[in-house]
Amino acid sequence: MKNKLFVGNLSYNLTETTLEELFAESGKVVSVAIPTDRETGRKRGFAFVEMSSQAEAEAAIESLNGKDIEGRQIVVNASKPKEKAY
């Protein structure tokens, strides 16, 4: 498992700072990215969080997967590599 996590079912109001603070409870956060729609600029409801170690990533999954954040039950799991489109 890598240190990069996929975080799904996020509130559109959630910020990178809020996510970083949330995940910092499980360890050192290296980066947080919340993708936006190219055309509208609106957040897409998911994010990628990179932790500094695999143990911290596993701790974040254990403590945050299924947790209610701003009225939504978030999904946290290991990020999978992007599949190539043919």
Image (cartoon, grey):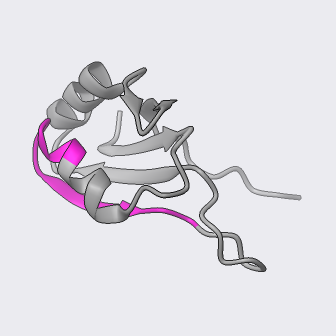
Residue at 52%, 47% in the rendered image:
11
The question of residue 26 being in magenta is answered with: yes
Residue at 75% from the left image edge and 56% from the top image edge: 84
Left or right of 36 on screen, residue 3: left
- Residue 70: which quarter of the image? top left
Residue 85, quarter of the rendered image:
bottom right
Question: Quadrant location of the N terminus?
Answer: top left
Residue 35, relative to residue 8: is it above or below?
below
Residue 20: image location, x then y, percent: 24, 55
Q: Residue furthest front?
A: 71
Looking at the image, which residue is at 42% across and 55% down? Answer: 14
Instruction: Give how far across and how far down residue 8 sits, in percent.
Output: 54, 39
Name the residue rendered at 37%, 24% in the picture: 67
In the displayed structure, would residue 6 be above or below residue 64? below
Where does the image place residue 18, in percent across and percent down from the top left? 28, 56
Please say if 26 is above or below 52.
above
- The quadrant in which the C terminus is found is bottom right
Left or right: residue 56 compared with residue 70: left
Check the image and report above or below for 85 versus 38.
Answer: above
How many numbered discs sit on the rendered protein? 0
Along the line of sight, the residue nearer the viewer: 65 or 80: 65
Looking at the image, which is closer to me, 59 or 34? 34
Q: Which residues are magenta?
A: 22-35
